[in-house]
Amino acid sequence: GILDKIRLYLIKKLLPHLEDRRKYHQEFASSTSFHGVHNIVQTQSKTRKVLWLLVVVGCLAIVIWQICSRFIYYFSWPTTTTVVVQYVENVKFPAVTFCNLNRFQAHAVSNLKIIFLIWNIVSGVLQKFAMEDKYSQELNDFLLGNQNFSIKEFTRKNGFYLNSSTLLECEFFGKPCYPQDFEHVFTEYGNCFTFNRDGLPARRVSLSGRGLHLLFDVQQEQFTDEPALGYTDAGITFVIHSPEELPRFDGLGLLTSVGMHAQVAIRQLKSIIQEYPWGECKPDIKLQYHKIYSTNGCLQECKARYIQDRCGCLPFILRGNGTECDLLKFYNCVYPAVYDIEVKALCTVGTHNSTCPAPCEEMDYPTTVTYSSFGGEKAIKYFSAKLKKSPEYIRQNLVRIDIKYHDLSYKTTQQQKALTISELLADVGGQLGLFCGASMITIIELLEYIFTNFCWMCIFLLLKAPEMPQWNNPSQNQQTHKEKKKGIQEC
């Protein structure tokens, strides 16, 4: 029938005779580019056969061990770190955000001490703040009697301001600057002001040792804060950051107390890390309301989303598009929501599987700060006469800050793959070539040989070919003296 014809066709066309198969094995062993195999087949001496067999097996074992070790090393995702310092003719100046440690005007809060607590609750979305129970009743009474009170407008109007009376001197790279060169921003310190913010003309310096020179009058009599809440210092706090990023004071702000002169030397450090699994960054993450990705910006957007979903409004201190939260919402919903975010770790930072993984590229400005007392006797007399203030006022209110580059250079720290896929292939090829003399062509030869024998075996099993018993016949399985000389013909 048809099945018999198919069987006959497969046997005649696709399945060679036993002698042809033996000849195929012998020719492969003699002609393969896998070094050493032909020496086993062609040599007549049994001793040499054994020696060459040991050499081939030993080299094969070594190359398998080496290749496995290279693959294990590759899949451990190793990295190296390179540091490159490049000197340039000029360098971009960073953004600097300044705040008064005394956040509010004294006359505005003299009869309204609760404002300090309210602002701490509002700014709690930026930093951790735990409210004591003793303030709860006082806060409830204020909220019930002032439901239309706007802490945003109150702070903007009655917080720290920047004008010619608070910014006495401003100079950038030898040219004067003015209060209008600073941009207002809300932080946990209330009204703050940023110099060289993104969107303004980029400022560059071409000499180290020269940069931003400022002289502040903090006006302690005009501005005040609440020591009971931990605000006991007087002076200026500032943070140096990338112009594209928001200022972050929590743990990163620098302080200069009154009567002090701070000289800040900065360097520019760019960090580049690999994406997962070599590093912890995810290059496809984009922020909706921030120009560049940063963990601080990502955290703020994560908090904004959670608060907006839970409370139906958005704190004005966070970026986003939503209805602004009033004071009652801040106290009854936003504050508990921020607490849940912290306790339940709803917005996490650092690893690749966290809410906000590490950025693939990050610009940082390491600082070296030195302090000295502001002004000698002549300087005190000069400013006392200029401002028509007493020497004691000068010592208790003036703050001088100088910010400059240590040198005109970029320092780039880059995380790199210790072993790339091309280097892995080169290692594997080198091991195969060194121990076995093998190449890609050799691998193709072996695959062809294995595939051919696999097909023959499948035909044996499917058709139960007549030659099948011959493979199991002990009398035919025993090698003749001539076949023994041929070595591995039956392999």
Image: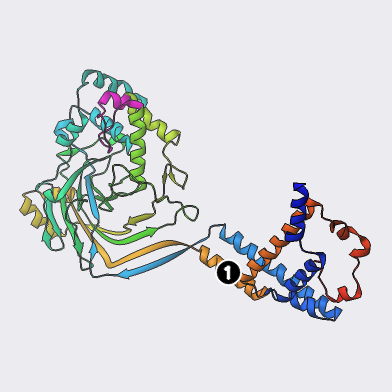
The residue lying at 28 percent from left, 23 percent from top is: 328
Q: Nearer the viewer, residue 347 or 417?
A: 417
Name the side, left or right, on which 414 lies relative to 101.
Answer: right
Say whether residue 318 is magenta: yes
Residue 276 screen position, x and y as percent:
47, 52
Q: Is residue 213 above or below residue 482?
A: above
The tally of labels here is: 1
Say whether residue 119 is magenta: no
Provide the secondary structure element on which disc 1 rests.
Answer: helix
Residue 155 screen position, x and y as percent:
19, 34
Residue 108 screen position, x and y as percent:
15, 31
The residue lying at 33 percent from left, 40 percent from top is: 300
Q: Amino acid at mark 1?
A: Asp
Name the side, left or right, on which 22 lies relative to 423.
Answer: right
Q: Is residue 323 above or below residue 92?
A: above
Residue 164 screen position, x and y as percent:
9, 48
Q: Crowding at label 1, few (<14), some or many (≥20) Cα neighbours within 10 Å?
A: some
Where, by quadrant of the figure, is residue 338 drawn? top left
- Residue placed under numbered mark 1 in the picture: 427
Q: Which residues are magenta?
A: 310-331
Q: Nearer the viewer, residue 167 or 359?
A: 359
Q: Nearer the viewer, residue 8 or 114?
A: 8
Q: Is residue 391 visible?
A: no
- Please identify the residue farthest to the right as the structure is shown: 475
Magenta portion: prevailing SS class: loop
Q: Nearer the viewer, residue 390 or 293?
A: 293
Q: Is residue 262 visible?
A: yes
Where, by quadrant of the figure, is residue 457 drawn? bottom right
